[in-house]
Amino acid sequence: MEYHSTGSPTARLGGSVPNPTDLSRRLLSTQQAQDAADSTSDNEGVTTPTSRSRINSVTRFDITPGTPFWGSFSPAPRSPVLIQCCCRREDCQNLLVFLDNTRSMESELRLAAEVGQALLQKHELYQKDMANFQSALEHQCARAEQKVQELDELVHELEDTQRVLTRERDDALRQKNILEEVKFFSV
């Protein structure tokens, strides 16, 4: 069996800890043995009691529909996994450290999932706020464009009025000049 170096963080947790790859292989073989035992007992119709240690009976990895994040897990076709060390001792230091690390990783995974959910909710809230802000801004822009059109129309009206008044002034000046000339010549 391979062991981690003594300076590694895993080794500091509980002395000599087996390599995770080796543990995965042993876990797989234990699962296969349990599946084989379950299938033979199902085929025979007889329930055979299995020898389970106190530690292994506590460490079932069972995800049921009532648990949080059920939708993110795919259902496993087999029964819960019983983890047992190759030495078959209940107080095996390697198994205890493995189970402790597993629980720690599960709690970190739950925390990461909760943080992820919180971030998703916050993101959705920001998106909703942004949509509200965008619609308010679009409404404000539409009102501003309408006001610009109204002011453009007012400017055109004022320019037309100015042209009319300028013509009337020019006509009045011409008439005044004509009257002054007539008055000047008549005097």
Image: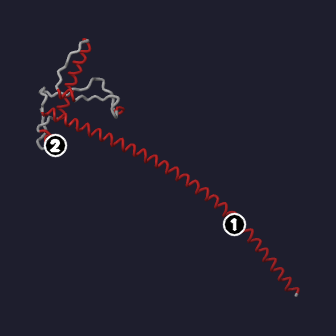
Instruction: Give the residue pinned by disc 2.
Output: 9
Q: Point out the tag, 1 or 2, that comes first from the N-terminus.
A: 2
Q: Position of residue 157 (x, y in %)?
A: 70, 63
The dot on residue 159 is 1
Q: Residue at x 33, y 43 (%)?
A: 115
Numbered disc in front, either 1 or 2: 2
Identified by mark 1, the residue type is Glu
Identified by mark 2, the residue type is Pro
Q: Nearer the viewer, residue 123 or 25?
A: 123
Most extreme residue toward the bottom is 187
Say if 84 sits above or below 43 in the image: below
Q: Quadrant of the N terminus?
A: top left
Q: Residue at x 28, y 23 (%)?
A: 78
Q: Quadrant of the C terminus?
A: bottom right
Q: Is residue 21 left or right of residue 145?
A: left
- Secondary element type, mark 2: helix
Residue 47 picture quarter: top left
Q: Position of residue 38 (x, y in %)?
A: 24, 18
Q: CA distance from mark 1 to mark 2?
A: 84 Å
Q: Is residue 71 left or right of residue 185?
A: left
Q: Is residue 103 left or right of residue 64?
A: left
Q: Position of residue 128 (x, y in %)?
A: 46, 46
Say if 162 sits above or below 120 in the image: below
Residue 24 picture quarter: top left
Q: Residue at x 83, y 83 (%)?
A: 181
Say if 100 sits above or below 131 in the image: above
Q: Is residue 117 left or right of residue 95?
A: right
Q: Residue at x 28, y 38 (%)?
A: 109
The crowding category of the residue bearing disc 2, from other C-alpha atoms within 10 Å (few below 14, some 14 to 19, many at least 20), is: few
Q: Position of residue 154 (x, y in %)?
A: 67, 62
The crowding category of the residue bearing disc 1, from other C-alpha atoms within 10 Å (few below 14, some 14 to 19, many at least 20), is: few
